Amino acid sequence: GAVSTACAMPGNPRVAASSGFRLAFPFSHSAFRTDARTIRGTMGAALSKVEQEYREKARHVAEKYMRPRSAQCDRTGEYPRDVMQQIIQAGLMGVWIPKEYGGGGFGVMETCLIVEELSRVCGGLGVAFSVNALGSFPIVLGGSEAQKKKYLPRIASGADFISFALSEKSAGSDAGGM
């Protein structure tokens, strides 16, 4: 199915502009505006060499392969399969999956760094990537050994994508009550 994309296009209020972040509240105040370059520069000093490498890989893929197509995907709702292939080829898919199941063996920090860089160019791409983590975390954390061996290697390699679905509380599903 189609993925709703919210790409970083000039004037798109749904996504923070690349020059800074603004909170999406019904009011505006200069105290809530932060220069993104300052945040990335400060955070970069605190990141390990491996974290920085993964962040750079994600930035490269997002800039080279998604930025030229982000407006088109935003207009059409097209799922960027070719860009997801580039993410897989860059070794970014499945970084959150333990090494014994074919993943990178990294944690939430590395996953978030990748999502941040992908989302900086196109929010929909960040969601398309992160939903694979969200959908596979229940298997990583609570799956049987048989389930882990069956599903995680294929997710880590990018052979299979996984997702997470939730309906609205009024429609019969209450994630907070599960």
Image (cartoon, helix red, strand yellow):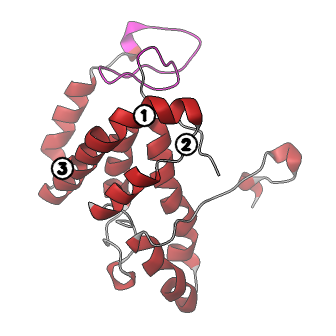
Mark 3, Cα crowd under 10 Å, few <14 / some 14-19 / many 20+, is some
Let me know if residue 7 appears in the view: no
Image spot of residue 16 (x, y percent):
42, 24
Q: Which residue is drawn at 77% across and 50% down?
A: 167
Residue 47 numbered mark, or none = 3
Whole-angstrom CA distance, mark 3 to mark 2, is: 34 Å
Residue 78 numbered mark, or none = 2
Q: What is the span of residues highlighted in magenta in the rendered image? A: 10-31
- N-terminal label among 3 and 2: 3
Task: Name the image quarter holding the C terminus.
Answer: bottom right
Image spot of residue 128 (x, y percent):
50, 50
Secondary structure beneath dot 1 equals: helix
Q: What residue type is labelled 1?
A: Ser
- N-terminal label among 1 and 3: 3
Determine whether 1 is above or below 65 in the image. below
Secondary structure beneath dot 2 equals: loop
Secondary structure beneath dot 3 equals: loop
- The reply to whether dot 2 and dot 1 touch (C-beta < 8 Å) is no
Q: What residue type is labelled 3?
A: Leu
Whole-angstrom CA distance, mark 1 to mark 3, is: 28 Å
Residue where numbered disc 1 is placed: 70
Q: Residue at x 17, y 59 (%)?
A: 50
Task: Choose between 109 and 88: the one closer to the eye.
Answer: 88
Task: Choose between 161 and 19: the one closer to the eye.
Answer: 161
SS majority, magenta: loop
Whole-angstrom CA distance, mark 2 to mark 1, is: 10 Å
Horizontal side of 63 relative to 160 (left or right) equals: left
Determine whether 23 is above or below 127 in the image. above
Marks 1, 3: nearer the viewer: 1
Q: In which quarter of the image is residue 36?
A: top left
Image spot of residue 132 (x, y percent):
50, 61
